[in-house]
Image (cartoon, rainbow, N blue to C red):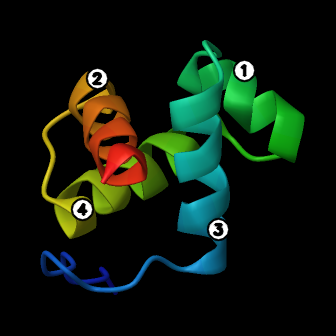
Amino acid sequence: MQTPDPKPGEPLSKCELKICNFLISTPLTQAQIGEKICRSERTVKWHARRVYIKLGVSNRLELIFKERKELAA
């Protein structure tokens, strides 16, 4: 059974929040993030995609800019 895509604005799960923090604060690849948290690269990519959808961004760079903009506000 496949999980439906999230909707923009939905809250992040604990795992998504953890991965989001790594994506924002480190230059690690998704494979390296997976190694750090004992998950596969595929799992990290899956969660990252959900983070992007929920936060309304298309990629990691947009995520970083969005986070910095919100911190500055």
Residue 3 or 60: which is nearer the viewer? 60
Rendered residue at 19%/80% (across/down): 9
In the drawing, what numbered circle is on residue 15? 3
Q: Kindly identify the amino acid type of the residue bearing the numbered disc 4.
A: Leu
Specify few, some or many for label 2: CA neighbours under 10 Å numbering under 14, 14-19, or 20 or more.
few
Q: Residue at x 58, y 64 (%)?
A: 17
Q: Is residue 35 rendered to the left or right of residue 41?
A: right
Quickly name the residue at label 4. 55
Mark 2–mark 4 distance (CA, rounded to whole Å):
13 Å
Q: Residue at x 26, y 43 (%)?
A: 66
Image coordinates of residue 37 in percent, x first then y, are 84, 45
Inter-mark Cα distance, 3 to 2: 20 Å
* SS for callout 2: helix
User: What's the CA distance linking mark 3 and mark 4?
Assistant: 15 Å
Front position among marks 2 and 1: 2
- The Cα–Cα distance between marks 4 and 1, rounded to whole angstroms, is 23 Å
Residue 40 x/y as whole percent: 68, 40
Question: Which residue in the structure is indicated by mark 1?
Answer: 32
Q: Residues within 10 Å of mark 1 (few under 14, many from 20)?
A: some
Estimate how packed mark 4 is, as few (under 14), some (14 to 19) or many (20 or more) residues with alpha carbons within 10 Å: some
Q: CA distance from mark 2 to mark 1?
A: 17 Å
Q: Secondary structure at mark 3?
A: helix
Please give the residue where the numbered disc 2 appears in the rendered image. 61
Whether pointer 3 and pointer 4 mark residues with C-beta atoms closer than 8 Å, the reply is no
Tag nearer the camera, 3 or 2:
2
Among numbered discs 3 and 1, the one appearing first in the sequence? 3
Which quadrant, please, contains the C terminus?
bottom left
Of helix, strand and loop, which one carries label 4? Answer: helix
